[in-house]
Image: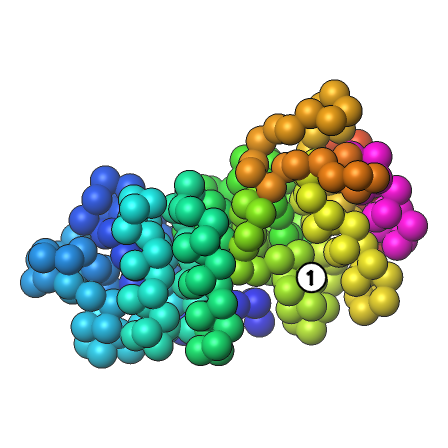
Amino acid sequence: MAILIDHGTRVIVQGITGTQGSYHAKAMLDFGTRVVGGTSPGKGGQQVHGIPVFNTAKEAVEATGADTSCVLVPRQFAAGAVSDALEAGVRLVVVITEHIPVQDVIRFVHRAGKLGSRVVGPNCPGLASPGRCKVGILPDTIFKPGPVGVVSRSGTLTYEIVNSISEYGLGQTTCVGIGGDPVIGTNFIDALGLFERDPETKQIVLVGEIGGSAEEEAAAYVKEHVTKPVFAYIAGRSAPPGKTMGHAGAIISGSKGDAKSKVEALERAGIKVATWPADIPRLILGEM
């Protein structure tokens, strides 16, 4: 099985009539995803790549039975789109949009929890389960079905490491890009717990970066709750001490947040940490 998405996942693309929405809806179709509808206020009744367009998520869900949404709308409309999807009963909302005001994110993440739904993102590339489903903007060609679960804060590094894993013949069960903002709907610990319970996932890769304490918290969780081999890469090792870089979440605080503290915490938890992204599959093969 995959985590969060699978063959039966029915996806609507919010913002499907925009340039990004149209492009990525087609890429999701090409990946094998069941994209059953899209939304764009005032454009209901149209079609994009043969996908019916609705004015609201509620209309789309009622007509198609969709259970998952991919939010590809401009930031000023993003919170409204997420709320629309949640109130329509969507169980998984994948928010690709970046620069959403943090207060808006706090509100819709809290609302999702109240309704029993899950948000992935915002400011994330989405998630993909090779041979099954993709929700988001991850490149189609880098994936290969296999036993490795990947969870990452960094979009571009996700692609590089997934591609390396595929080139070494390993492949992935699911790759989850959680985003690097200070407030996100699904964090490392959430994904680690899902991978631990997934019988098809045999190894787990965690891709972190400087800033915040998410990696240190993940290390503590792995030590207590994860029985599968975990491997990690931390971006930003060469950043000058005290430097704020990359995502909005990459802010160093006290003794936590820098690359050294993260690597030390991960290694204390028994996690092998790669020096370079391409080292990840070599570490996995060594463990196997």
Residue 199 drawn at (x, y percent): 68, 72
Query: Residue 262 colored magenta?
Result: yes
What residue is shown at x 15% (from left), y 63% (from top)?
Answer: 55
- Residue 162 in the figure: left or right of residue 106: right
Badge 1 marks a residue whose secondary structure is: helix
What residue is shown at x 73% (from left), y 62% (from top)?
Answer: 202
Looking at the rendering, in which quadrant would you find the N terminus?
bottom right
Q: Is residue 169 above or below residue 1?
A: above
Q: Colour scheme of this structure image?
A: rainbow
- Residue 164 in the figure: left or right of residue 127: right
**Of 177 and 31, the residue lying toward us:** 177
Query: Residue 169 colored magenta?
Result: no
Q: Is residue 98 above or below residue 191?
A: above
Looking at the rendering, in which quadrant would you find the C terminus?
bottom right
Which image quadrant is residue 14 in?
bottom left
Q: Amino acid at mark 1?
A: Ile
What residue is shown at x 9% (from left), y 57% (from top)?
Answer: 42
Q: Which residue is mark 1?
A: 189
Residue 149 drawn at (x, y percent): 65, 57
Image: magenta residue range: 259-272
- Residue 144 in the figure: left or right of residue 92: right
Residue 184 drawn at (x, y percent): 54, 55
What residue is shown at x 20% (from left), y 66% (from top)?
Answer: 56
Q: Is residue 257 above or below residue 240?
A: below
Q: Main secondary structure of the magenta part?
A: helix
Which image quadrant is residue 190 in?
bottom right
Query: Around disc 1, counting alpha carbons within 10 Å, would you say few (fewer than 14), some (14 to 19), or many (20 or more)?
Result: some
**Of 186 and 164, the residue lying toward us:** 186
